[in-house]
Image (cartoon, grey):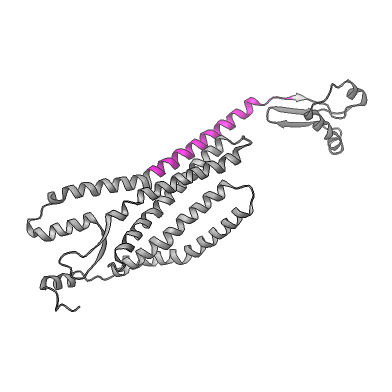
């Protein structure tokens, strides 16, 4: 590097911060490239098929809506976060300018928030699905519910990612020549304080910034991992309890009544005005007589159990 227009300390610092990619970083770059090359086309294909199926079906499926949302979140991760990490690990310097720095910082966090929140929405939807398993209007309500859940999830991901556009900025650290980096503001403050005070620097000089960084990181981890994780675990435990309740109630609610197959004309004449269910049962008589004419057959359905006795 030409140091004719730089101070001696700047040139020494630039030489000290020369960056070489080591083995572990090469491995990480390789993994990112593999995810981008393989995952990118597969997710695009999956999104295309999901959108086509969603448009073709008149009855909108909440499962398909959740799948499309998860596809979009994955694509943001693959086409924004992954390329940024590959470039940054390769050169360890930022060349994209201020605007791109803030945009990439926003979408890198937004992709992880959206992934976590969509998966949490899927878990919550499973709870409602298990609870309303016997409801005739469950399908229509499920689609409306999923749209609401996803809207809340995407808006929350957007709102929680906005601080990234303020926290991250492009800086040229003192003592590093023309070296530029897209960094959070507290990292820049640490470096500038340490560079300005030299041997007199004390950690208490940046105690306030340290506290701010810790608070932000705790909130970030809570919303990006721990809260969605707790929601997912509690949701599927609730599903198991609901299904266990359905299974335990089924035997106690069943009851049986007897019905003879092959009514004679005299039997039919004594039969009162038939209900819709008795007409349906009577329509099946000929089929049962052909298949099992002289055997005892047991029919069970929900709270009723039909027993067809031998015809003598």
Number of numbered labels in the structure image: 0
The residue that appears at 56% across and 50% down in the rendered structure is 64
User: Relative to 4, is 51 on the left or the right?
Assistant: right
Residue 210 to residue 182: above or below: above
Question: In the figure, residue 243 lies in which quadrant?
Answer: top right
The residue that appears at 11% across and 70% down in the rendered structure is 9
Residue with the most extreme front position: 99
User: Relative to 65, is 74 on the left or the right?
Assistant: left
Is residue 239 shown in magenta? yes
Residue 28 visible to an observer of this rendering:
no
Question: In the figure, residue 198 lies in which quadrant?
Answer: bottom left
Pick whichever, 23 or 55, lies toward us: 55
Pick whichever, 61 or 250, lies toward us: 61
Q: Position of residue 62 (x, y in %)?
A: 56, 46
User: Is the magenta region chiefly helix, strand or loop?
Assistant: helix
Residue 235 visible to an observer of this rendering:
yes
Residue with the most extreme left position: 200
Is residue 14 shown in magenta? no
Residue 308 to residue 77: above or below: above
Q: Quadrant of the N terminus?
A: bottom left
Q: Quadrant of the C terminus?
A: top right
Q: Position of residue 298 (x, y in %)?
A: 76, 31
Q: Position of residue 83 (x, y in %)?
A: 38, 65
The residue that appears at 87% across and 36% down in the rendered structure is 286
Question: In the figure, residue 84 lies in which quadrant?
Answer: bottom left
User: Relative to 55, is 37 on the left or the right?
Assistant: left
The range drawn in magenta is 227-256
């Amino acid at each position: 590097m030409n140091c004719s227009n730089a101070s001696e300390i700047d040139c020494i610092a630039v030489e000290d911060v020369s960056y070489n990619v080591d083995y572990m970083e090469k491995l990480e770059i390789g993994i990112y490239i593999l995810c981008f090359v393989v995952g990118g086309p597969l997710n695009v294909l999956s999104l295309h098929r999901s959108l086509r199926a969603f448009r073709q079906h008149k009855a909108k499926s909440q499962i398909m809506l959740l799948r499309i949302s998860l596809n979009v979140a994955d694509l943001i991760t693959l086409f924004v976060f992954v390329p940024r990490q590959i470039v940054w690990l390769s050169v360890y310097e930022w060349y994209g300018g201020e605007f791109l720095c803030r945009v990439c910082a926003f979408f890198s966090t937004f992709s992880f928030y959206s992934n976590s929140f969509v998966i949490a929405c899927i878990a919550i939807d499973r709870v409602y699905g298990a609870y309303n398993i016997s409801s005739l209007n469950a399908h229509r309500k499920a689609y409306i519910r999923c749209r609401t859940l996803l809207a809340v999830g995407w808006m929350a991901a957007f709102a929680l990612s906005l601080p990234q556009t303020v926290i991250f900025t492009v800086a040229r650290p003192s003592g590093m020549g023309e070296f530029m980096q897209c960094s959070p503001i507290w990292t820049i403050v640490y470096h500038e304080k340490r560079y300005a005070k030299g041997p007199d620097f004390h950690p208490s000089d940046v105690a306030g910034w340290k506290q701010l960084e810790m608070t932000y990181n705790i909130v970030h981890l809570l919303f990006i991992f721990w809260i969605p994780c707790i929601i997912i675990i509690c949701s599927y435990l609730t599903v198991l309890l609901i299904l266990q309740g359905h299974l335990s109630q089924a035997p106690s609610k069943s009851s049986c009544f007897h019905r003879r197959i092959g009514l004679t004309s005299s039997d039919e004449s004594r039969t009162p005005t038939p209900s819709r269910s008795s007409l349906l049962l009577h329509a099946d008589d000929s089929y049962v007589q052909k298949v099992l004419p002289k055997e005892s057959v047991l029919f069970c359905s929900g709270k009723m159990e039909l027993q067809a006795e031998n015809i003598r």
